[in-house]
Image (tube, coloured by chain):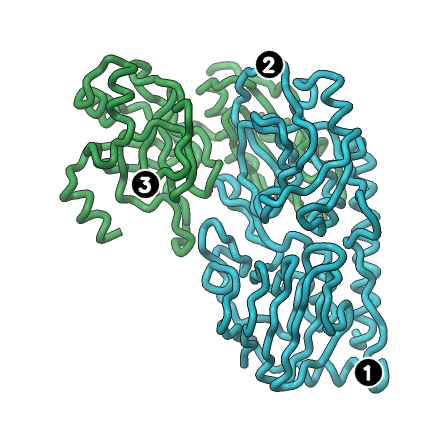
Chain colours: A green, B cyan
């Protein structure tokens, strides 16, 4: 069994929240530990803790305003307790199947990614849809907005120099070593290579978010006709 | 049973204490920007402190009451004949007009018994960016009819009068509305405070910042000198909290408010003490504030003091109801 990392420290996010930080750079092993730790804290239950948020490099705990104690100290103690027995990464997360239409109409930046990577568009689609290492590293920025790790390094490009004022909802976009799915029409600077008919966040669902940290994701290519059919039934 | 909206005001939304437990999937808690004033308004009509009420922003609405309704407006001081900070029996057919804020920015209008609104994900708060919660997921418009839960107004008003005689004279104390500007906002060092050089750190605490017009329920943008970092290293996107003060590339800080994003990649120079967030919520665009560097212990003391003041006020009000 690999040795578990120790937190770099506990960063107070004000006096009612604290971030237990393990890494300041993206490290997939540590990200997985953050998710296991978050699951352990949720399972254990902690009085006064309202939200447990696994992030890229650690776990944030948000306390109830009625909490009278020291948030950072309580977080540190809780983490020390929970690190002793973490659940297995394989027992966490679900398999999420995400159909993506990579047609030019939706793939706003596919040509640009192609010219930057010198990989033809069809090959980019094949590589993106063929990836089998995708895992949700964090959900944030906007409700239901996943940061999905495991992108083929050959497809790695930086974010766009000028972000778009509005990226259409459902857009599937890449940058660096990650993929995101835009749940709403929001501003964004990632390179859009397709669109999914799935609704990433729906407040009327019992579980409103399609993605949660730790989920394993598979993308598969669909044509425009199937996109329209799925969109209609969604 | 309903209240009709004759004029919606600038931004009037239904808010309660927010939805919790969903930050891990990117949903902020939301809820009342000034939960202290919300609790007071609710107490004044005999409701639980976290019942849903109308959050009124800078320019108030005009409402028509279709039934006798015990109501209370608490928070910012508004122009108009609306007596604030006390319970008021609005008679059937009566119109109440809330004018423009003259001190503070937000007030809460609570109605005895509360609104008949289905909670979404555990809360009646309106989340504007997601178009859900509250009244149809949006700000109120002309012609809306806000459904009320039950007719408890007459009974509660009678209870009040037994205590207070023929009318209610007493006032709830405004706890969050600024007396003078700039207000002092206590803040601890943020995670990335050290990424700014000493001169910039000083500038942050020496400056009297102005709330910029493009501020909203997600965040308050602050106008003042740009806080420039020496390095342009990207920061790993990490969690944020209510009251986090981020510094984006243009150097102008953003204080994260109720509908804030749950993670962010901008450096956080400071974190506002929890006790002071409702006071910041009472700043209208153009209002001024400055930050005072505070330790965690002091922030916690401030939180205790604020809670004691609120609890005392809530108790005093409950006593007037005979509870």
Pointer 1 residue: B167
Name the residue located 53 percent from the left edge and 19 percent from the top edge: B234
Q: Chain of mark 1?
A: B
- The residue tagged with tag 3: helix, strand or loop? loop
Query: Between tags 1 and 2, which lies in front?
Result: 2
Which mark is on residue A170? 3
- The residue tagged with tag 1: helix, strand or loop? loop
Vertical side of A74 occupied by B257: above or below: below
Percent coordinates x, y for residue A138 in the rendering: 46, 32
Q: Nearer the viewer, residue B268 or B319?
A: B268
Q: Is residue B294 left or right of residue A160?
A: right
Percent coordinates x, y for residue B263 in the rendering: 53, 34
Which mark is on residue B231? 2
Q: Which one is earlier in the sequence, the residue at label 1 or at label 2?
A: 1
Q: Chain of mark 3?
A: A
Say whether marks 3 and 2 touch (CB < 8 Å).
Answer: no
Percent coordinates x, y for residue A83 in the rendering: 58, 26
Mark 3–mark 2 distance (CA, rounded to whole Å): 34 Å
């Amino acid at each position: 069994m690999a040795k578990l990392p120790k937190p770099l420290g506990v960063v107070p996010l004000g006096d009612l929240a604290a971030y237990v930080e393990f890494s300041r750079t993206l490290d997939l092993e540590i990200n997985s530990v953050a998710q296991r730790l978050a699951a352990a804290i949720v399972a254990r239950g902690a009085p006064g803790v309202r939200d447990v948020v696994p992030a890229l490099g650690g776990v944030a705990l948000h306390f109830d305003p009625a909490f009278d104690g020291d948030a950072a100290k309580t977080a540190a103690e809780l983490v020390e307790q929970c690190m002793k027995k973490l659940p297995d990464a394989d027992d966490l997360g679900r398999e999420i199947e995400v159909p993506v239409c990579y047609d030019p109409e939706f793939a706003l930046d596919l040509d640009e990614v192609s010219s930057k990577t010198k990989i033809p568009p069809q090959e980019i689609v094949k590589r993106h849809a063929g990836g089998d290492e995708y895992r949700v590293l964090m959900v944030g920025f906007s409700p239901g907005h996943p940061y999905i790790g495991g992108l083929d390094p050959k497809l790695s490009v930086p974010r766009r120099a000028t972000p778009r004022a509005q990226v259409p909802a459902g857009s599937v976009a890449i940058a660096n070593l990650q993929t995101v799915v835009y749940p709403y029409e929001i501003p964004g600077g990632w390179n859009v290579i397709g669109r999914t008919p799935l609704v990433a966040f729906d407040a009327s669902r019992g579980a409103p978010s399609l993605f949660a940290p730790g989920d394993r994701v598979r993308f598969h290519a669909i044509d425009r006709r199937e996109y329209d059919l799925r969109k209609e039934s969604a | 049973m309903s209240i009709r909206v004759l004029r919606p005001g600038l931004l009037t939304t239904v808010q309660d204490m927010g939805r919790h437990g969903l930050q891990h999937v990117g949903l902020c808690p939301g809820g009342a920007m000034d939960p202290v004033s919300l609790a007071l308004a609710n107490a004044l009509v005999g409701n639980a402190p976290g019942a849903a009420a109308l959050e009124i922003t800078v320019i108030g609405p005009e409402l028509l009451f279709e039934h006798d309704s015990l109501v209370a407006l608490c928070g910012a001081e508004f122009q108009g004949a609306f007596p604030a900070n006390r319970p008021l029996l609005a008679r059937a057919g009566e119109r109440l007009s809330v004018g423009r804020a003259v001190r503070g920015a937000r007030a809460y209008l609570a109605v005895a018994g509360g609104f008949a609104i289905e909670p979404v994900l555990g809360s009646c708060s309106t989340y504007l960016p997601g178009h859900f919660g509250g009244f149809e997921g949006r700000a109120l418009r002309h012609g809306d009819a806000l459904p009320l839960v039950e007719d408890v107004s007459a009974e509660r008003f009678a209870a009040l009068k037994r205590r207070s005689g023929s009318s209610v004279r007493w006032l709830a104390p405004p706890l969050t509305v600024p007396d003078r500007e700039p207000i002092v906002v206590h803040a601890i060092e943020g995670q990335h405070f050290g990424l700014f050089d000493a001169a910039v750190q000083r500038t942050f605490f020496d400056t009297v910042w102005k709330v910029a017009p493009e501020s909203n329920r997600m965040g308050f943008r602050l106008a003042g000198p740009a806080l420039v970092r020496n390095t342009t290293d990207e920061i790993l996107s990490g969690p944020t909290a209510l009251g986090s003060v981020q510094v984006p590339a243009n150097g102008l800080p953003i204080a994260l408010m109720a509908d804030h994003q749950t993670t962010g990649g901008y450096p956080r120079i400071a974190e506002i003490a929890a006790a002071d967030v409702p006071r910041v919520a009472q700043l209208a665009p153009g209002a001024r504030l400055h930050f005072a560097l505070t330790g965690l212990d002091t922030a916690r003391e401030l939180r205790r003091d604020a809670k004691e003041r609120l609890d005392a006020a809530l108790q005093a009000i409950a006593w007037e109801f005979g509870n």
